[in-house]
Amino acid sequence: MVASIEAGADVCYTKYLERKHQLWKKAGSSFNHLVANALIEKPKDLYLSSFKAMRGSIAKEVIKYDGPYVYLDGIILGITRRIATISIKHGDRHDGEGNYNLRRSISLWLKMATSFSVLPLRFASVAGMIVAFLSMLSIIAIFIMKFTHPSIATGWPSLIAATLFMGGVQLLFLGVIGEYLGRTYLKINSKPQYVVRETTKSDG
């Protein structure tokens, strides 16, 4: 890891050649891997291991974060993309138990999902647009069916379609509100727009 840092990487993660975790941890890790690709724009080939090394300058940027819910990998990916990975052997645990049980693993995942991305909030907007669009199609279909088949009972289909349309519109506006709240939250978390890697000073 030190060699990778000295070669120019800001952070070096480790990747186990053969993981010896329990099956539920492996499954949870795979799910977290896929979600992190979308939420925090993690490189697809990067395994977010807890065993990693980083430059002192990166560590100084990390400790500037003063938010209530810390997700270290999210902070690191917001600071730098100069990341290296090395493969290591995963040894057996000889004593004690791991700190991350199921509850803590879920808590860590929620920190990642809610602290560094507004994508979950945008899901409400997308869902609202889809529901509103489908309900509009349903309303048009009901009118066409009523004109072509006057014997069709009226009332219930149009009522359901109108209800779905209003629900879709509400979801859409909730998503818009959530977008503003999400951006405010990211601002409160002091997510950096850029990080100065190094500065040069001319004596002239």
Image (tube, rainbow, N blue to C red):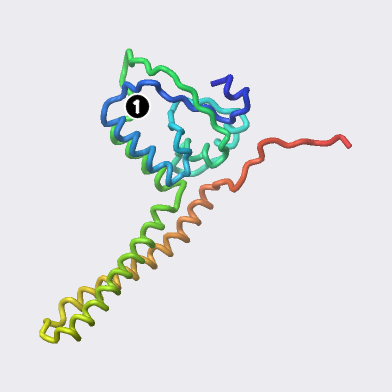
Neighbour tally class for label 1: few under 14, some 14-19, many 20 plus, Cα within 10 Å = few
Which quarter of the rendering shows the C terminus? top right
Using the image as rendered, state which of residue 78 and residue 14 is in the foreground: 14
| Residue ranking furthest to the right | 204
Q: Residue at x 20, y 77 (%)?
A: 159
Using the image as rendered, state which of residue 27 and residue 112 is in the foreground: 27
Q: Position of residue 155 (x, y in %)?
A: 16, 81
Asked if residue 132 is positioned above or below residue 146 in the image, the reply reads: above
Quarter-of-image position of residue 97: top left
* Residue identifier under label 1: 99
Q: Position of residue 16 (x, y in %)?
A: 40, 23
Q: Position of residue 127 (x, y in %)?
A: 34, 61
Asked if residue 90 is positioned above or below residue 147 in the image, the reply reads: above
Looking at the rendered structure, the number of numbered marks drawn on it comes to 1
Q: Residue at x 33, y 15 (%)?
A: 92
Asked if residue 145 is positioned above or below residue 69 in the image, the reply reads: below
Quarter-of-image position of residue 61: top right
> In the image, is 83 to the left or to the right of 16?
right
> In the image, is 93 to the left or to the right of 11?
left
> In the image, is 145 to the left or to the right of 114?
left
Quarter-of-image position of residue 140: bottom left
Q: Residue at x 62, y 32 (%)?
A: 57
Type of residue at label 1? Asn
Q: Position of residue 82 (x, y in %)?
A: 58, 34
| Residue ranking furthest to the top | 94
